[in-house]
Every structure is written in structure tokens, then in C-alpha cells.
Image (cartoon, rainbow, N blue to C red):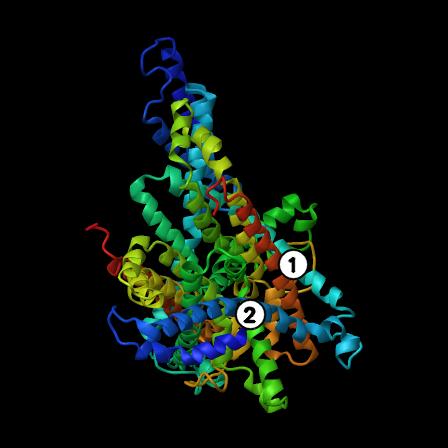
């Protein structure tokens, strides 16, 4: 497949240019143009599959020394821990906890805003609100990280103190509350802000597809607006909501810079309000990769491979839910 | 809860009279409740919190208003209307809540970045090659002029993004042409659609690692694996490959959507005139949908312009300007912001680094917003005419 691509891409421009302009061309030149063009299109499609396969293959090849140090490297163990699992499991834990915090905060708000735009807002306001939400999606992640570090983290310090004082018996709020606010909980809040527009825009697209006749039937039966939403919009959009939340989760799992800037990392801990605890896979890679070489580099690439597998699974489940409900809902 | 008792009495007295307005709430109820909630909320915020804070006041008032409206509606009208109103208020609250971080982010960047940009426009034309710890300490302690800037980051971002666009637009465009014009819904097309969807979800840092691993494997296999060769791996091209992995699925999705809305009559008319398929695509289908494609590509560019992590691991960061994406390290604007915030040039005098970082953040946001605006303008200005059919 790759051979085909290179062969065509080198010969493609020639027939495209040599063909006389105007629509009345025919004959053999056009026929070969047809073949070249369809081959080019076919090859581009194939290239995408090849690239994705290469992503997996390259990541695996480069991470083999860390996954089986005794076989693929001249060392007996990896450099940061005894086994790779010991190294990567705490990082995975941190990644998943931060993403779950983000989902818990973002999902209700995002579904609320999507409903606001699709069913509650006056029509004059709905379109600008959509733009505003898109604006939220356009802000680069490094800016969110800087904002989280400078503005959000100090603002959350009193809340962490309060949580520790009143709910300190829970493991999440045990430990010394941070004085800088640069904790896993703050990272979760920043992630929530970042995935909010994604979930919102996906949900909105599905909500507006609710069949008008269903809605009007519900209203005609005397339902209030909320009863109409509950009886027609939610059943119609359930699969879509679930899959958009999953896509948001995929984004939160892989988000790097915001967490790297906000979190002051450390060993894994259930306490969410202490600084110098926890780390996520992306932030670990971003912090250490620029200076890493040899075994350390393999470790980090292997951690990236784990992240790739998790997000791939999450995304595939999301797409599968959508495709399963395609026929009878608007979730496509 | 003074508002509560006030509104309870009257409708209860009116209830037996079966007029058209029985069981209806007067229009002024919500404003009275809001006023009461604001007043009580202010009191609660002052008493419960250590000192009065606007955030506490807003939260207490919102909760009081939503609960108050629920109780009042339940007493005056009925439970179903109360539930309806409760959810309406919650939906409004969700919307207002989402505005808080947006305004806060924009305000933080403006407040921190704009003063630097106005007082030291030099940050836009200098790079960091003459800036070191000593100059920054002089700036912070003796009030010397802010030295250095981020022009090398701007150049790096432009070069890397340009290269990524050159790689991903032809591939993405042709792939969507295949999906829409050539495939007949076979397994190959379904596989492409599915994996393009999957690619959308690849974490950006994994894309960076992939590009790094791919280029490293290529160089060690074909050129050599000495330290000098390993040094070669980090360059603008590697970053462009990483960004392409992120960009291709976006381009494919948006282009595919645009090609699908081209009316079939146009294609059939062209075929009926004896025009070959590839010329039909080039002369009829693509020109018809070009505005949508261009706006989708612009949005994809806007998305990758702000990416930090993949460039950080593939292109490194340097202090001087590098125009050549095929050799040597290259700094992109987001990476510059990150490095200046995390590793200030002078660790004992971090203020100048912070000033440069925030000015760069403001410039980056402006670039991304302008690209988004441009995409909308393109979509609107060059859209095919809808009338005349």
C-alpha cells in the first residue's frame, strides 16, 4: 500500500497539469488521469491507516527496552522503579483520578449548557452563546495551564482548607491542605473547564436533532418544558450524551500542559488536596522527556503507549455506542 | 426568607376564586425573590465566610434564589411547575457558571500580558539569544529595560504549522475525496472512517512521542546512531509530523462533511456532459465546497497552533532564532510560554520571564482567535449561493 502511495504521489502532478483545460477533454489522457486520481485518493486513505498502525508499532518498538529490560536492553531493570508496572500504575492512577474529577464537574454543567442553547435560551442569545463556548475551546491548553497556576490555584486554597476541616475523615481530603493550591484537585478543575466545550458542542448537536413532533406531542399532552425535555430529548439523546462524555474523558486523559503547569507532582496518594502528590502520565512525559535518554526515554515512551491504549479503548467504546444507536437516534 | 412569607399570603387568599389567573404567579415574584436572595446571601457570606467575598455572595445568592423560587412556586402553583422552574434555573446557572472561567482566563491574560506588550513592544522583534540571568536580574532590581522577546517562538510556530499544513492538507483532502466520491461503503472506507474518528482522540503528547520515535528509528536505521545523529532527531520537521497526526483527522472530518453536501445533481450534470470523474471532482465538486474546506483547514490550523506538548518533545527549545525546520532545535510560541513559566531565565528574578510569558500568551490567544474568526469569514464570504435554483 505504501509503495502505491509513493508511486502515485510522484507521478500525480504531471497528468494533472498536462491535461488541457476546459471540460471537453476526453480520450486516453483523461482515462489515465482518472486512474491516477482514484489511486491517489485510495492511497491517501490507506496512508491514514498506515500512519495509525505506525503509531502503534513505533511506540511498541521504542518502549520494548522498558517493558522487558532483561531481553531488550543490557540492564536488569528500568531506572525509576523495580518493574515497569510499579512505575506506571501510580501514574495511571493519578491520570484517571484527575480525569474523573474533571468529568464529575464538567458533565452536568456541559449538559446544562447544551440544553440551554438547544431548548431554553431565547433564540437571539442561543447563537452567540454557541460562539462563546467555541471560544472556550479555542484557547490553547498552555494558557489554561498558566491561568490554573496563577489565578485558579490560589483561589481554591480556602476551599481546600474548608474541605479538610469538615470532610477530613475522607481519604480524598486527608493530609495537609496545600498552601499553593497546586494539587490534583486543581488540575481536575482546569481539565473540567477544558473538556466542557467538547461535551457541550457534541450534546448540543444531538439535542437539536430531537424530532420536533415528539416535543410538540409532549407539550400538547400538557407537559411542562422540563417534562418535555425528560420525556423526549433525553431518551433520544442518551447514547449521544454517553459517547460525548466518553470523548471528553479521552481528551481529559491525554491533556498535558494544563496538568504539567498546575500540578506539583510527587508519589501517588489518595489525598487530592495536598501539593507534591500524584502525577499523570502526560505531565510525567512532558516534565522528563526533554532531558531523558536511553532507558529513561524508553520508560517514558512506554508510559505514553499505556496512555495511548487507554484513550484508544475509551474512544473506541464511545464510537461503538454511537454506531450501535445510529439507526434510531440522532447520535451520529 | 422574607420574600417567601411575603408572596405566600396573597395567592392563598385568592385561590378559591376560579378565574383564569388562579394558580398563576404574578410576574414580579422572581424579581422580589432575587432581591431577597441577594440580601440574605450578602448576610450569609459576611457571617459564614471570613470576611465578605463577592464569590461567596454570588454562590449563596444563587442557591437561595433557586431554592426560594422552587418553594414559592410549589406553594403558589403546583409541584410540577416548581420542578420545571427548578430545572430552568439550574440550566441558566450552568450557563452562567461556564462564563466564569472564560472571563477569568481572558481577564488574567489581558491583565498580565497587555501592560508588557504596550510598555515593551520589543518582545515582538527580539529573541532570547542576548538575554541571560544577569540582564533579567538587572530588569527586576534596577528597573532596566526588559530584554529579550519571543520572535523566535513566532517564527518557529509559523514554520512548524506551515509544514504540518503542507503535509496534512493533501492527505486529508484526498482521503475525504476517496471516502465521498470513490468508496461504496466497503470495509476499507468504514475502516478509514472509524480510525479517523479514533485518531481524533489521540492524546497530543502521544502524537509527539510517535513522531519522535518514528524519526529516531528512521535516522538510526538509515543514517547512523552516534550522538550527533541522535541529536538530529529533534527538529522542526519532527514537530510538523507530530502536528500532522493531530491535523489529518480534523481535515478529513470537515472536508468529508463539506463534500457530502455538494448536490448530486451537479455531479450528474457534469457526467452527462461526458466529463471524466477526476475532472468533475477537480472542476465541480471541490470548487463548490471550497469555502467549507478552507474554513475547516483554518480551524485545524488554529487547533494545532496552540499545541505545546508534541512540539516540546519533538523540537526542543532554544534561545536563538532558527528559520530552518530541517535541522537544529526550534522553539514554538506555546513551548516558550511553558519554559518561561516553569524555568525562568533567572531563577532568582522570575518577574521578567513571567512578563514575557504572559505577553506571549496574549499574542498566542490573539493568533488563535484571529484564525477562528478567519475561518468563519471564509465560510461566510465564499459560500456558494443558495438562491437561484
Identify the residue under disc 2: A50
State the residue lying farthest toward the front. Answer: A27
Number of numbered discs: 2
Judge left or right: residue A279 versus residue A73. left
Q: Secondary structure at mark 1?
A: helix
Q: Residue at x 38, y 8 (%)?
A: B16
Residue depth check, mark 1 versus mark 2: number of the one nearer the observer: 2
Residues B122 and B270: in front is B270
In the image as oriented, which residue stretches furthest toward the left? Answer: B388
Q: Residues within 10 Å of mark 1 (few under 14, many from 20)?
A: many
Q: Residues within 10 Å of mark 2 (few under 14, many from 20)?
A: some
Q: Nearer the viewer, residue A236 or B177?
A: B177
Q: Is residue B72 visible?
A: no
Percent coordinates x, y for residue A1 in the rendering: 54, 72
Q: Position of residue B292 (x, y in %)?
A: 33, 60
List x then y, in percent, for residue A290.
58, 77
Q: Nearer the viewer, residue A171 or A162?
A: A171
Q: Relative to A70, is A97 on the left or the right?
A: left
Q: Secondary structure at mark 2?
A: helix
| Residue at left offset 65%, top offset 44% | A167
Instruction: Determine the chain carrying the residue at label 2.
Output: A
Residue at 40 percent across and 16 percent down: it is B9
Q: Which residue is mark 1?
A: A94
The one nearer the camera, A3 or A258, is: A3
Q: Residue B312 location, x and y as percent?
A: 53, 74
The vertical placement of A14 against B303, above or below, is below
> Would you say residue A183 is visible in this rendering?
yes
Q: Which of the two labelled residues, at mark 1 and mark 2, occupies the earlier sequence position? A: 2
Query: Are the residues under badges 1 and 2 in a single subunit?
Result: yes
Residue A95 sits in which quadrant? Answer: bottom right
Output the chain of dot 1.
A
Amino acid at each position: 500500500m505504501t509503495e502505491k502511495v509513493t508511486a502515485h504521489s510522484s507521478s500525480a502532478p504531471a497528468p494533472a497539469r498536462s491535461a488541457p483545460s476546459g471540460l471537453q477533454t476526453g480520450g486516453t489522457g483523461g482515462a489515465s488521469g482518472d486512474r491516477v486520481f482514484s489511486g491517489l485518493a485510495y492511497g491517501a486513505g490507506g496512508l491514514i491507516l498506515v500512519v495509525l498502525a505506525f503509531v502503534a508499532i513505533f511506540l511498541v518498538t521504542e518502549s520494548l527496552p522498558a517493558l522487558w529490560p532483561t531481553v531488550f536492553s543490557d540492564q536488569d531493570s528500568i531506572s525509576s522503579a523495580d518493574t515497569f508496572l510499579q512505575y506506571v500504575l501510580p501514574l495511571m492512577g493519578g491520570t484517571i483520578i484527575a480525569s474523573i474529577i474533571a468529568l464529575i464537574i464538567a458533565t452536568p454543567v456541559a449538559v446544562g449548557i447544551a440544553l440551554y442553547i438547544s431548548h431554553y435560551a431565547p433564540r437571539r442569545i442561543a447563537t452567540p452563546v454557541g460562539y462563546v463556548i467555541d471560544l472556550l475551546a479555542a484557547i490553547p491548553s498552555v494558557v489554561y495551564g498558566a491561568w490554573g497556576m496563577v489565578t485558579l490555584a490560589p483561589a481554591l486554597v480556602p476551599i481546600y482548607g474548608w474541605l479538610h476541616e469538615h470532610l477530613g475523615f475522607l481519604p480524598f481530603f486527608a493530609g495537609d491542605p496545600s498552601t499553593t493550591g497546586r494539587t490534583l484537585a486543581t488540575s481536575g478543575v482546569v481539565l473540567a473547564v477544558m473538556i466542557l466545550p467538547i461535551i457541550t458542542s457534541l450534546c448540543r448537536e444531538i439535542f437539536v436533532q430531537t424530532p420536533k413532533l415528539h416535543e410538540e406531542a409532549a407539550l400538547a399532552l400538557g407537559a411542562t418544558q422540563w417534562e418535555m425535555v425528560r420525556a423526549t430529548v433525553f431518551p433520544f439523546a442518551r447514547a449521544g450524551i454517553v459517547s460525548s462524555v466518553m470523548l471528553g474523558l479521552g481528551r481529559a486523559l491525554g491533556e498535558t500542559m494544563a496538568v504539567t503547569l498546575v500540578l506539583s507532582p510527587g508519589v501517588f496518594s489518595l489525598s487530592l488536596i495536598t501539593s507534591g502528590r500524584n502525577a499523570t502520565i502526560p505531565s510525567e512525559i512532558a516534565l522528563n522527556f526533554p532531558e531523558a535518554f536511553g532507558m529513561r526515554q524508553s520508560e517514558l515512551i512506554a508510559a505514553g503507549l499505556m496512555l495511548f491504549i487507554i484513550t484508544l479503548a475509551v474512544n473506541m467504546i464511545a464510537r461503538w455506542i454511537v454506531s450501535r444507536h445510529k439507526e434510531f437516534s440522532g447520535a451520529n | 426568607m422574607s420574600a417567601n412569607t411575603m408572596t405566600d399570603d396573597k395567592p392563598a387568599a385568592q385561590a378559591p376564586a376560579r378565574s383564569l389567573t388562579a394558580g398563576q404567579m404574578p410576574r414580579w415574584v422572581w424579581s422580589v425573590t432575587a432581591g431577597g436572595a441577594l440580601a440574605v446571601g450578602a448576610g450569609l457570606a459576611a457571617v459564614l465566610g471570613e470576611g465578605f467575598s463577592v464569590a461567596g455572595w454570588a454562590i449563596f445568592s444563587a442557591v437561595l434564589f433557586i431554592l426560594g423560587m422552587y418553594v414559592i412556586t410549589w406553594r403558589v402553583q403546583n409541584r410540577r411547575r416548581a420542578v420545571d422552574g427548578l430545572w430552568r434555573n439550574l440550566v441558566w446557572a450552568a450557563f452562567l457558571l461556564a462564563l466564569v472561567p472564560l472571563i477569568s482566563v481572558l481577564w488574567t491574560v489581558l491583565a498580565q500580558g497587555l501592560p508588557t506588550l504596550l510598555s515593551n513592544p520589543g518582545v515582538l522583534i527580539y529573541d532570547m539569544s542576548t538575554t541571560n540571568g544577569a540582564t533579567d536580574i538587572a530588569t527586576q532590581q534596577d528597573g532596566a529595560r526588559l530584554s529579550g522577546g519571543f520572535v523566535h517562538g513566532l517564527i518557529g510556530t509559523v514554520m512548524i504549522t506551515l509544514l504540518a499544513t503542507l503535509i496534512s492538507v493533501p492527505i486529508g483532502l484526498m482521503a475525504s475525496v476517496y471516502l465521498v466520491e470513490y468508496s461504496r461503503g466497503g470495509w476499507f472506507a468504514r475502516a478509514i472512517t472509524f480510525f479517523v474518528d479514533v485518531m481524533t482522540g489521540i492524546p497530543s503528547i502521544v502524537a509527539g512521542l510517535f513522531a519522535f520515535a518514528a524519526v529516531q528509528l528512521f535516522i538510526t536505521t538509515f543514517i547512523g546512531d552516534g550522538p550527533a545523529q541522535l541529536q538530529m532527531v529533534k527538529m522542526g520537521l519532527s514537530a510538523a509530523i507530530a502536528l500532522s497526526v493531530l491535523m489529518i483527522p480534523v481535515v478529513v472530518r470537515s472536508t468529508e462533511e463539506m463534500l457530502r453536501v455538494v448536490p448530486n445533481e451537479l455531479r450528474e450534470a457534469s457526467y452527462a456532459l461526458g466529463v471524466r470523474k477526476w475532472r468533475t471532482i477537480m472542476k465541480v465538486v471541490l470548487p463548490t465546497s471550497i469555502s467549507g474546506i478552507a474554513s475547516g483547514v483554518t480551524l485545524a490550523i488554529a487547533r494545532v497552533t496552540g499545541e505545546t506538548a508534541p512540539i516540546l518533545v519533538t523540537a526542543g527549545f532554544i534561545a536563538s532564532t532558527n528559520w530552518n525546520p530541517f535541522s537544529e532545535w526550534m522553539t514554538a510560541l506555546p513551548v516558550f510560554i511553558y519554559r518561561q513559566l516553569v524555568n525562568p531565565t533567572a531563577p532568582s528574578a522570575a518577574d521578567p520571564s513571567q512578563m514575557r510569558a504572559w505577553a506571549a500568551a496574549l499574542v498566542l490567544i490573539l493568533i488563535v482567535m484571529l484564525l477562528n474568526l478567519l475561518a468563519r469569514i471564509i465560510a461566510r464570504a465564499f459560500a456558494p449561493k443558495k438562491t437561484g435554483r
